[in-house]
Amino acid sequence: MKTKFSLLFFLIFSLSSISLFSKSPIRIDIKGEGNPIIFIPALGCPGTMWNETVEHLSRTNKCYTISILGFGGLKSVKDNNFTDIKDKLISYIKKHKIKKAALIGHSFGGSLAIELVAANPDLFSKLIIVDAYSFPLDVFVPGISSETAHYEADKLFNTLLKLDEAAFKTQQETQLKEAVTDPEKLEEILNWQLNSDRNLFASAMSRMIAMDHRPELKNIKIPCLVIGTWEAMAKYGFSKERTRMSFEDQYKNIDNHKIIIAEKGRHFIMFDEQDWFNQQLDLFLQ
């Protein structure tokens, strides 16, 4: 009887552990050996969006690719939220004693990376922000207040939730045509977004445009590389130099920063100009 009880206890404990682990809002995949690099994906994308970049950098680095459950067809967890996502990542870094990792985030992932480094400045060695502004709405509506930004973000959130599947697909496809040039990559990203948890997707998008990270940038003392694009914005009157000035203004509170604007290529620059993009990473990370 005692043996059966012990076995039952072991099974219950094991199942409980699996259940608790499965509730984590993130999944982490590891490849390579060397200096650590942590990758955060873009809105609605799984960590696999970084596959080509990781394939390149994992030759000399240990790459930790974050996937947010609920993005890209990955099953979401109940009450998923971005505070928990950040906390779980920081806990993982500390638990596994990942020392001085470089952190790279694209778009929404770049916004999240800013928050992580600003709140935990001693955990990271370098920050790479890919085509993300610290307060996006101010670029297009200079001087916009935080209150107005949150109001617009709330409207966007409600709009995204009300769209039916066909309308949501049309909207995202239209936006992605300006964000990536390769038709196959466009289709892949679109499928990731369409198969994302809509509530989490809407929360992430509205959060990204509502947050003004500029005041907290002063907490970032590590070297920071910002890679921007402008080609898709040219029809809206943005020249390469105007784009550079916008990024410089957005990140002026980081003392040790460098801005690089791609000559060509769109928002998903890691797909549009893969060789150039990898070269910029290599130079910064060496």
Image (tube, grey):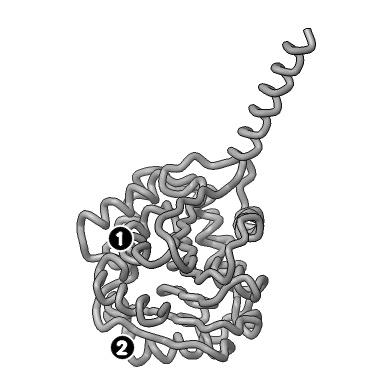
Quick check: 120 above or below 75? below
Q: Amino acid at mark 2?
A: Ser
Q: Which residue is mark 1?
A: 52
Task: Give the position of the C terminus as an image quadrant.
Answer: bottom left
- Could you say where residue 166 lies in the image, as x and y percent from the top left? 34, 44
Q: Which element type, helix, strand or loop, lies under badge 1?
A: helix
How many numbered badges does the structure rendering display?
A: 2
- Could you say where residue 263 lies in the image, as x and y percent from the top left? 26, 83
Q: Which mark is residue 239?
A: 2
Q: Which element type, helix, strand or loop, lies under badge 2?
A: loop
Position of 186 with respect to 75 (left or right) is: left
Residue in the picture at 51% in, 48% down: 27
Residue in the picture at 50% in, 51% down: 28
Q: Amino acid at mark 1?
A: Glu
One can see residue 42 in this view: no
- Could you say where residue 173 lies in the image, as x and y percent from the top left? 30, 56
